[in-house]
Image: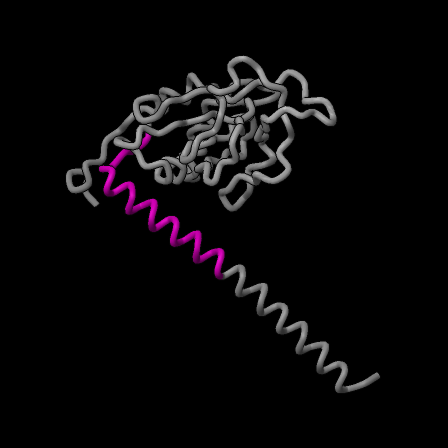
């Protein structure tokens, strides 16, 4: 679709979202800690584009803890792995923070749709561009300062929501296909066992 019909422009990430690194936890909370704060680590980012909120480890509180608290529709981007993944935070438990393994992007909702932003950052070509600006040889990482100046294609907010909605439908289709495949596997296994029973030893 020609740019003039969709209002597509280039925009820096820091012009469309508030951006910061996650919380740098120096030492894990001791066993049996009663801290009300829990922390999301890189391993809690699931392949299907969700955060696994169950069994998050506790985190000892610090004075600035609130600034790292995850809010609904924040976009969390893994920055300490070349397997980059952007995830929209949904159904966020209270007093949950992002670790330093993430960059936290809080979209300006009048400029960018959170789902569109995550979809764009997850594109294979965009992830290649992001990997190209990684720093460090032993443990590669994506500096938040470089992410701030990274440019993305930004159509109108209406077009962004359309793209995000289509992507949601594609995700739902994949989920239904996976459920159907599992159901068919169960049916085939049951039919095979029935046939074996009927034939006898």
In the shown orientation, is residue 161 left or right of residue 51? Answer: left
* On-image quarter of the C terminus: bottom right
Is residue 64 found left or right of 3 in the rendered image?
right
Image x and y of residue 54, in percent: 60, 40
- Residue at the outermost top position: 63
Q: Is residue 24 magenta?
A: no
Q: Is residue 72 left or right of residue 201?
A: left
**Quadrant assignment, res 34:** top right
Residue 19: image location, x then y, percent: 40, 22
Q: Nearer the viewer, residue 155 or 68?
A: 68
- Residue depicted at x 45% and y 34%: 127
- Region of the chain picked out in magenta, as a range: 152-176
Q: Residue furthest left?
A: 4
Q: Main secondary structure of the magenta part?
A: helix
Camera-side residue of 123 and 117:
117
Position of 44 relative to 184 (above/below): above
At horizontal 56% and vertical 25% (from top left) the residue drawn is 99
Q: Residue 12 at x, y = what percent?
A: 31, 24
């Amino acid at each position: 679709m020609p740019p003039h019909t969709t209002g597509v422009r280039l925009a820096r990430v820091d012009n469309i979202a508030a951006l910061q690194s996650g919380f740098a936890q120096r030492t894990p909370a001791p066993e049996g800690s009663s801290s009300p704060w829990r922390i999301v680590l890189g391993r809690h980012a699931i392949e299907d584009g969700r955060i696994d909120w169950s069994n998050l480890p506790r985190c000892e509180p610090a004075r600035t803890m609130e600034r790292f608290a995850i809010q609904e529709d924040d976009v969390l981007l893994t920055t300490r792995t070349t397997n980059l993944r952007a995830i929209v935070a949904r159904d966020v438990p209270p007093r949950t923070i992002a670790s330093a393994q993430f960059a936290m992007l809080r979209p300006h909702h009048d400029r960018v749709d959170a789902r569109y932003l995550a979809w764009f950052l997850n594109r294979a070509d965009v992830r290649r561009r992001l990997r190209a600006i990684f720093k460090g040889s032993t443990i590669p990482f994506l500096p938040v300062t470089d992410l701030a100046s990274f440019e993305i294609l930004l159509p109108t907010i209406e077009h962004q929501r359309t793209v995000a909605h289509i992507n949601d439908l594609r995700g739902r289709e994949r989920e239904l296909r996976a459920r159907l495949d599992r159901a068919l596997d169960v049916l085939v296994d049951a039919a095979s066992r029935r046939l074996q029973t009927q034939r006898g030893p």
